Image (cartoon, rainbow, N blue to C red):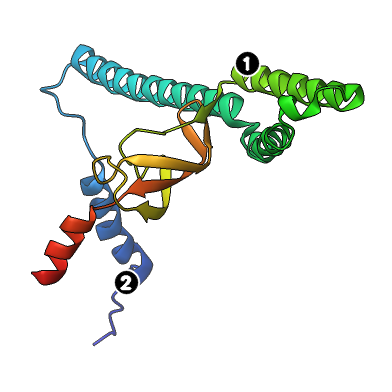
Amino acid sequence: MPNQKTDLTEVPPEADAAQPADAATDAATPEEDPSVSEEERLAGEVATLKDQLLRALAEVENLRRRSARELEEANKFSIANFARDMTGVADNLERALASLPRESLEGNEPALQLCEGVEMTRRELAQAFERQSIERIDPLGEAFDHNLHQAMFEVPDSGEPPGTVVQVIQHGYRIHDRLLRPAMVGLAGKTSNEARIDTEA
């Protein structure tokens, strides 16, 4: 009986594996939602871009305001350190004038001219302080304020309510609303009777 040959065409395994991969790719391809029209899609994109634009404009405006505020503060307080140093010069001019009473200089023309020159310098410095919004703090007779004053001692039996400034050791200064240095002061303390009552209690 003659041998019969069966012609079987073999299929490469790569081809079999490629078919499910292609099917998976087709299944993973997103399809546009047919219920959303082109007009609705464009409207959504416009709304998103508008929101992003408004946020960017708000950030720019905040940056502009912050920069303007920082520039204003820099202009106001750029001389603060120099002004603080000049307060010591003002103190020395006042001390010099206090040590040269005019009545003791009568008949001494050079000393009188020197005193007048120191007084003119003091006035000129005070005017320069005023032009730069530098204000002297003279709290005599005022209630103690820890934001502006530095208490150095208490004065008993001063006749003033406790906590009142009865002596100014050194004047304070501020530039605009910023303190350059506090005023050094002496405060009214309790009377002797009040102190004795507190001790007995």
Q: Which mark is residue 7?
A: 2
Residue labelled with disc 1: 131
| Position in image of residue 30 (x %, y %) | 23, 39
- Under circle 1, the secondary element is helix
| Dot 1 crowding, Cα within 10 Å, few <14, some 14–19, many 20+ | few
First in sequence, mark 2 or 1: give its number.
2
Image coords of residue 159 (percent x, y): 27, 41
| Residue drawn at (28%, 45%) of the image | 163
Q: Is residue 182 visible?
A: no
The extreme right residue here reads 110
Q: Quarter-wise, where is residue 35 in the image?
A: top left
- Tag 2 near tag 1, CB within 8 Å: no
What kind of residue is marked 2?
Asp
Report which quarter residue 18 is drawn in. bottom left
Give the x, y percent position of residue 136.
53, 29
Q: Residues within 10 Å of mark 2 (few under 14, many from 20)?
A: few
Name the image quarter holding the C terminus.
bottom left
Residue in view at x 28 percent, y 23 percent: 48
Which corner quadrant holds the N terminus?
bottom left
* Residue 121 in the image: above or below residue 18: above
Q: Is residue 178 left or right of residue 85?
A: left
Q: Residue furthest top?
A: 39
Q: CA distance from mark 2 to mark 1?
A: 112 Å
| Percent coordinates x, y for residue 56 in the rendering | 40, 24
SS at badge 2: loop
Residue at image position (48%, 31%) is 137
Viewer-nearest residue: 149 or 36? 149
Inspect this view and state whether residue 69 appears.
Answer: yes
Q: Residue furthest bottom?
A: 1
Residue 157 relative to residue 77: left or right: left
